[in-house]
Amino acid sequence: MTEDNNSCQTRHRLLESACRIFAEKGFHKATIVEICGEAEANVALVNYHFGSKRKLYDKAWRHAFTQAQACFPLDSGLTEKATGEERLRVFIFSFLNRLLDKGSAGYFARMMNREMAEPTPSFPAIHEEALVPTRRYLCGVLRGLLGAEVAEEEVFCCCYSVISQCVFLLHHLPMREKVLCKESEMYEKIDTLGEYLTRFCLGGIQAVRK
């Protein structure tokens, strides 16, 4: 194996370890020592490959977001003939999977969960590159369902209503086993959750449209 291959593999290990640890602990509590220990890499290699902890974090959240997009596209499997109802359903299922995935596809959502509690200087970039495009896509779907005459404020409010119901399920993860008991079983079934939230949101959209 050449030195370049070794270097690329080390960089990749550092990035993967950073994604997992930043997702688990957030930027402020994660340490370079811990990331390098998991990646089996010398601490000095973070500066060599990324420049600083902050720059490693920026690479990590972008890498995690790309993984989430690849695994769960917001328009997965849709054709141009898809109805607004179908588009909303696919969005909700994809978004829920991004939020609740227990593997690498869920790292970005967990990083954002930490980011909301303890914002970092990276948040403006995260907002513009990841959160705004997601919100813009959903607003387009909702605008089609609400009708051409709907006010932008109504579209905006519906968008945050849909997103909030999904994100709540991520925020209350630590409380499932302690509080929800038997009810927690429902929250492990994304198919059940997705169908329920789709019906609920479509009912709300219909009421707003009237």
Image: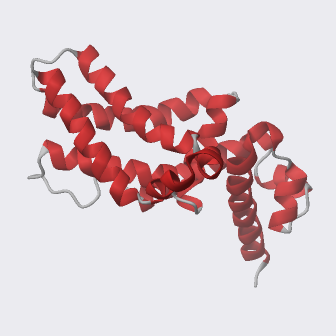
Name which residue lies at 30% across and 36% down: 138
Task: Answer yes or no: is residue 118 visible.
Answer: yes
Find residue 98 and report its horizontal and vertical position in percent: 47, 52
Find residue 50 and report its horizontal and vertical position in percent: 76, 49
Name which residue lies at 77% across and 55% down: 49
Specify whether 207 is left or right of 34: left
| Above/below status of 128 relative to 74 | above
Specify whether 59 is left or right of 196: right
Name which residue lies at 14% across and 33% down: 145
Task: Locate the C terminus by quadrant.
Answer: top left
| Above/below status of 134 relative to 45 | above
Find residue 128 and report its horizontal and vertical position in percent: 49, 30
Task: Answer yes or no: is residue 63 visible.
Answer: no
Q: Quadrant of residue 52?
A: top right
Find residue 51 and report its horizontal and vertical position in percent: 80, 45
Residue farthest bottom in this picture: 1
Q: What colouring style does the render use?
A: secondary structure
| Above/below status of 47 relative to 142 | below
Residue in the foreground of this view, choosing between 105 and 92: 92
Specify whether 29 is left or right of 77: right
